[in-house]
Image (cartoon, rainbow, N blue to C red):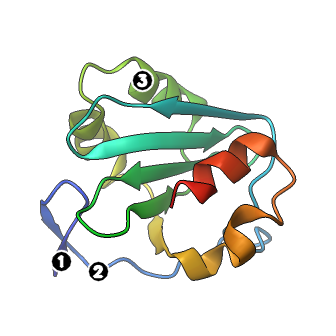
């Protein structure tokens, strides 16, 4: 048992690979990105094509990026308009969707292989 990015205990993340999805770092357009004024959530990137939500959590060391899979656009809209990004994620996303923790090693050359500028900027903040 570990804690999720909000500090709440929960099961260890698993390597999740949906059928036919390929590389978990294969970020495509159309994308949307938000930065948050939050003590825990730095920013998030939503991939409308794959319904993947990438959340960058602030850490005292390197930030952590979690990829949440199969997140509908309505959840992205809710997160983008939430008064508290961390609370919204804990209440609506963190336990309802498969996720995995991504590391710098998941993004070879710090995003230089990514074709989308928005995705590259999100990754290179790592």
Q: Secondary structure at mark 3?
A: helix
Q: Which residue is mark 3?
A: 78
User: How dense is the environment of label 2, judged by Cα within 10 Å: few (below 14), some, or many (20 and up)?
Assistant: few
- The image quadrant where one finds the N terminus is bottom left
Could you tell me which residue is drawn at 25 percent across and 40 percent down? Answer: 86
Q: Position of residue 33 (x, y in %)?
A: 59, 33
Q: Decide: is 39 above or below 24.
A: above
Q: Decide: is 23 above or below 118.
A: below
As drawn, is 22 to the left or to the right of 4?
Answer: right
User: How dense is the environment of label 3, judged by Cα within 10 Å: few (below 14), some, or many (20 and up)?
Assistant: some
As drawn, is 117 to the left or to the right of 46?
Answer: right
**Labelled disc at residue 77:** none
Q: Secondary structure at mark 2?
A: loop
Could you tell me which residue is drawn at 26 percent across and 19 percent down? Answer: 83
Q: Hey, which quadrant is residue 14 in on the image?
A: bottom left
Using the image as rendered, state which of residue 119 and residue 52 is in the foreground.
Answer: 119
Q: Which residue is mark 2?
A: 12
Q: Hey, which quadrant is residue 112 in on the image?
A: bottom right
Q: Position of residue 114 (x, y in %)?
A: 81, 59
Q: Position of residue 15 (x, y in %)?
A: 51, 82
Mark 1 vs 3: CB contact within 8 A? no
Observer able to see residue 76: yes
As drawn, is 18 to the left or to the right of 22?
Answer: left
**Labelled disc at residue 2:** 1
- Which of disc 3 and disc 1 is earlier in sequence? 1
- Which of disc 2 and disc 3 is earlier in sequence? 2
Query: Alpha carbon of mark 1 to alpha carbon of mark 3: how far?
Result: 26 Å
Mark 2 vs 1: CB contact within 8 A? yes
Q: Position of residue 28 (x, y in %)?
A: 80, 49
């Amino acid at each position: 048992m570990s804690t999720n990015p909000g500090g709440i205990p929960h099961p260890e993340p698993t390597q999740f690979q949906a059928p036919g999805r390929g590389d978990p770092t294969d970020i495509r357009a159309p994308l949307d990105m938000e930065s948050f004024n939050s003590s825990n959530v730095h920013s998030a990137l939503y991939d409308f094509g794959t319904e993947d939500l990438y959340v960058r959590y602030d850490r005292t060391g390197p930030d952590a990026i979690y990829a949440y899979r199969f997140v509908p656009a309505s959840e992205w809209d809710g997160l983008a308009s939430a008064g508290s990004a961390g609370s919204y994620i804990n209440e609506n996303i963190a336990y309802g969707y498969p996720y995995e923790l991504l590391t710098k090693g998941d993004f070879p050359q710090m995003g230089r292989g990514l074709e989308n500028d928005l995705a590259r900027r999100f990754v290179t903040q790592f």
